Structure formats: C-alpha cells, structure tokens
Image (cartoon, grey):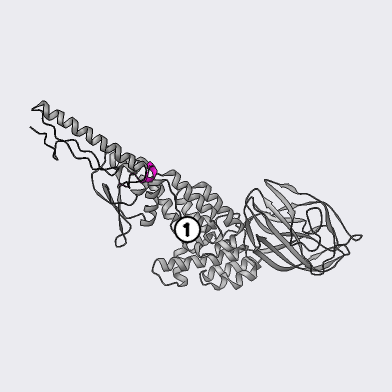
Amino acid sequence: MAAELCPSSTSTSLPRGNGVIANAVSVSKKSVPQVTETVAAAAAAAAASATTQHNLNNNNVEPCSWQSSHPTLRERNALMFNNELMADVHFIVGAPGEAQRVPAHKYVLAVGSSVFGAMFYGDLAEGESEIHIPDVEPAAFLILLKYLYSDEIELEADTVLATLYAAKKYIVPALAKACVNFLETSLEAKNACVLLSQSRLFEEPELTQRCWEVIDAQAELALRSEGFCEIDRPTLEIILTRETLNTKEAVVFEAVLNWAMAECKRQGLAATAHNKRSVLGTALYLVRVPTMSLQEFADGAAQSDVLTLEETHNIFLWYTASVKPKLDFPLARRKGLVPQRCHRFQSSAYRSNQWRYRGRCDSIQFAVDKRIFIAGLGLYGSSGGKAEYSVKIELKRQGVILAQNLTKFVSDGSSSTFSVWFEHPVQVEQDAFYTVSAILDGSELSYFGQEGMTEVQCGKVTFQFQCSSDSTNGTGVQGGQIPELVFYV
C-alpha cells in the first residue's frame, strides 16, 4: 500500500520560509512499507531543502518572508510598530472627536513599561482588546510606542511636552530624560515661563532650575512673552514672589495685566478692569507697586483701573507724605541679580601709547565652560580728563549678530572701566566661541589694557580668549580695549 501524503489538522506543520513550502506529512502506523516510503519522502524533501539553501546563498532565490529580509530582532520589532499584523490590543488615543486608533502588541509594551506590564499581565490585568486614552495626544503616544518598539526617539518642539507627559504616565525614564534634555536645549526667554509651569507639574527639578536661570536673567523678555500669559495661576504667583527677577517693577505690573486679560479670555469673561482684578485675586498684592518710581506709577499702574481709588490715593501719599499710609503691597525692592565681571588684563597704560579710534573696530573672541548671560562690556575711557564717548557694541556667534546696542558713556579720566549694556542679557552656551566688538567715537587719549590672559577664572566660570579677525584697531588677547565682560550666572 502506498503512503498517503496530505494536509492534516493533527500533523506537524512547517512554516513558510527560504522559498520552500513544506507540506504536512501524515504517517500511518499500519505497515512498515508505509514508514519506509515516508522516510524516503522525508529524505527527498531534505535534499530539496539543501538545494534551495544553496540557491539562496547564491542569490538565485528571493526570500519571500519579511522576517528573512530583516535579520536583527530590533529591525523586526520596529516593523511591528503601528502595524495591525499580529496586534492583540488597540488604543483609542486622544480627546473624543480627535481620537486615533493605534494597534499594538501587549508583550512589546509590557517589556518596555511597568505600567503596561501591570495593565496586561499583572494581578489586576483586564482582557480588553480596546483601551481608551483620552488624556494623551496621538502624536505623543506614537512617539512613545516607537521608542518601545525600536529604541528610536524622534522629538519635535510642538509635541515634546505631550511626549514628556506620556513618558511620565507610562514610566519610561529614558524617553522622559530625552524630552527634558530637548527642552533644556530649546529653552529661551519666550518659552521659559511655560516650561517652568510644566517642569513643576512633571517634577523635573533640573529643568525647573534652568527655567529660573533664564527667567531671572532675561526677566523683561520672559514676562513680556506670549508664553507668560499661558501659565497657570500657581506658577504666576511663584514668579511674582521671585526675589531675583532682574527687571523693573513696572514691567512686572504690565505683565500681570497681560496675564489677567488672557485669563479672562480663557474663562469667557469680558476683559474689563473689574474682571481682570477678579481673576488676579490676591496675586495682585505680590506686585511690589511702591518700589516703582513715582513717574512709573503715575504713567502706568495708577491709570490701569485695576487698583481701587483708595489704593491709588494711598500709594500717591506713600510716595509724597511724611507720614505714610499702610499698604497691602510689598514695600521692599527685589534684589535682582548682581552682575559679575571678567577682567582680562593685568595692567593698563595711557598717553605715551594712546589708543586711537577713528571709527575702527576693537574685538575679541571668548568661550566659557558654563552657560552664562552676557549683559554688557566694560570699556576704558579717556586718560586726559572727563570725556564722553559714543559706542556701538555687538555680540556675534559664527557671524550671526545676537545683540547690539548704540549707547554713550562718560569717563572721569581714571583707569577704571565703564559699563555699557546690551538692551537685554544674551544667553551664551558653553564650549562655543563668541565675538564681542566695540566701535568707539570720542577722545583718542584713552587707556588700554596690557598683559592680557588667554584664560581667566571668574567665580565658577572659566573664560578663554582668542584674537578676532573682526578687530581692526589693534585689540587682541595681549592688549587693547574691551577689558571686561559683564555677565550673570
């Protein structure tokens, strides 16, 4: 009796692969000839398999499976990302009406996240095949899943905060750290207040500290940004209590009014003086109104209509009367930040080798080993008595102008340095060279520096100096103008 070869539900099935489809073999135990014929058939199949493998090695046969064309486990896992193939769970991600259906594989998610592990395999695991996640943005959830499937992290400015939320929610520390690093590198005055609010929410102390550094040093830019108007009420109050805000109180008051207007809009209220006062509540009393100059108060806060007539009256009396009324506003000025100075010369000289200007540029390059904020320059003045100078100062990186200002200063004839300021402090990153320049117009009998240093330790910051190709008036590392860099850290 000939052996019978046919598919069988009880037979052992070999998977498709290497270009060969192996049929299931059903072996009858009734006779030895049947077994013999089966063995012969198996031998023939083995020979065919060997021939096919030989053809594969010689690229004569294209593998028909995606597994074969992706040799590493990482590549094969990556192919399963957002793929319906073998998906055993689906997520409905996003707010109702904007939700997106995302396929996934429980095992992969559980291996990468303890939250998913408990959700799918823990003691209280539930067997739903469809899970709703309304509080996570679809784009952020896909970034999270892509990392879990492939270790790839693709962050964008528009979604990084939502991704950080997802990484925190599902306890994926590496992705959360990458989000924080991304935020730190993109941190600037216009988004510092928003990121401060988020860093407090996500309990990220390092990011919080970086936000405070920017807000303190560039307070005016930060408070006047659109981002400031987007913060929550607790963050507003924390900023208003900040002792080291480096700006005028009139700027703080103006920023508070802008926030109140935005909050009225969020609450669907008309932006009347009454409503702005209502949404501010006790936060208004954190503004140090009496520390404004009388002129600033009269031109600004007194005409805002947010203060009551009694409050306005009492503040005017506080400015002018010998017996001052009691006020509900803080009376002490903010401490602000104390500027530090990096002095790069060991001595100065004058007259016998006077420093001439005539519209030429004095320039020097510098780098620091820690992030700082350049606020201005210290310059030498006249050695022949009191004199006024006009000066254009500039800060550049790789030829791009970051800040410039046209201003004046008066020197008293001494060898002291005289500060000139940029309009706003400028953030300077570590381990990158920047160029500062000054073009002076004034007395040519001027002091100049000597015995310059290539490296200067100033507090916790190390400065390195090198000559600049922009310098056309003789200033270099060893001598010349621009004796000081004025900065915050």
Residue at 18%, 30% in the rendered image: 39
Please indicate whether residue 353 sits to the left or right of residue 337 in the image.
right
Judging depth in this view, the residue of 432 and 314 nearest the camera is 432
Q: Secondary structure at mark 1?
A: loop
Please indicate whether residue 275 sits to the left or right of residue 49 in the image.
right
For residue 12, what is the image quadrant? Answer: top left
Going by the numbered disc 1, the residue's amino acid type is Ala
Name the residue that disc number 1 marks: 157
Q: Position of residue 38 (x, y in %)?
A: 16, 32
Residue 325 appears in the figure = no
Q: Is residue 418 above or below residue 300?
A: above
Please indicate whether residue 175 sits to the left or right of residue 409 in the image.
left
Seen as rendered, the residue at the extreme right is 352
Residue range of the region highlighted in magenta in the rendering = 65-75
Asked if the magenta segment contains residue 66, the reply would be yes
Seen as rendered, the residue at the extreme top is 32
The dominant secondary structure in magenta is loop
Residue 172 appears in the figure = yes
Q: Position of residue 265 (x, y in %)?
A: 42, 69
Q: Position of residue 285 (x, y in %)?
A: 53, 60
Q: Position of residue 218 (x, y in %)?
A: 60, 59
